[in-house]
Image (spheres, helix red, strand yellow):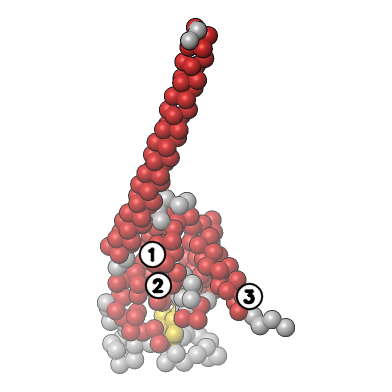
Amino acid sequence: MDINTVLKFISVASNIANIGLLIGLLVQLGFIYKQLKTDHERSRREKALELLQWWSSIISEEMLIAKKIGETFDKTTARKVCNGEPIKLNKELFPLVQRLFEKKIKTDNNNVFQNPFRKWKGNEKEPSCDSYITLETEEVIKLRYLLIKYLNSLESVLVGWQHNIADASVLKEEFSYLFKPEAGNETLENFRIACGGEKSFPAITIFLNHLKMERENQLKRKEPVV
């Protein structure tokens, strides 16, 4: 075997060895990528669980009662609450109001609970005292604080969904109940809008729009073909 043949043999063997090393390296990189992806997905699921646990710990009975009251706001009442002005609520909300403020609501003649609904003053065309409860400025400020705290807490959780920091599918599954208009649940829409809407609560707005679009698409798919 002459020297040229030996050199060619060495060159071919070297190339084969390099190809083998390259394949091995690619396999190793593929394994590392798969492992990193698995770890990342696990980390996102863990982050979603952390957010859910935090949400459960931060949401109080007071905040949930305030939300139930807030879902009944029309646009005018929502603006008044944002401005800390006295408001009038339907008498059906009295049990919630009584529980939230844990105080005795007085009537105009200072009788306690004989008639817990304060009278309207001045205009005879206004509804009777049996129709509405009046919340004064101090009570409205507390109500506003609880509603803002609820929305800020929800915004913090949904930022994780918006930016894919946490497992989006887990958060979506757990918070999809937020948009159920048929159940009177629109995540304090009038109050949110009065307090800045998408500028103040961008993640909530994007999340709710996402749910609305999904629902609309589902309805379109269910439409009969003519």
User: Residue visible at 51% across and 78% down?
Assistant: 181
- Count of all numbered marks drawn on residues in the image: 3
- Check disc 3 and report its element: helix, strand or loop: helix
Are discs 1 and 2 less than 8 Å apart at CB?
Answer: yes
Q: Tell me where residue 91 appears, x and y as whole percent.
A: 41, 87
- Give the answer, above or below, for where 86 lies relative to 27: below
Q: Is residue 141 visible?
A: no
C-alpha gap between disc 1 and disc 2: 8 Å
The CA distance from mark 2 to mark 3 is 32 Å
| Quadrant into which the C terminus falls | bottom right
Identify the disc placed on residue 67.
Answer: 2
Q: On the picture, is 181 further left or further right than 119?
A: right
Q: Is residue 77 left or right of residue 51?
A: right
Q: Disc 3, disc 1: CB below 8 Å?
A: no
Amino acid type at mark 2: Lys
Q: Earlier in the sequence, mark 3 or mark 1?
A: 1
Q: Using the rendered view, name the quadrant where residue 212 is placed.
A: bottom right
| Relative image position of residue 27 (x, y in whole percent) | 42, 37
Front residue of 43/194: it is 43
Task: Compare marks 2 and 3 and give the one earlier in the sequence.
Answer: 2
Q: Is residue 1 left or right of residue 40?
A: right
Q: Relative to 83, is 70 above or below?
A: below
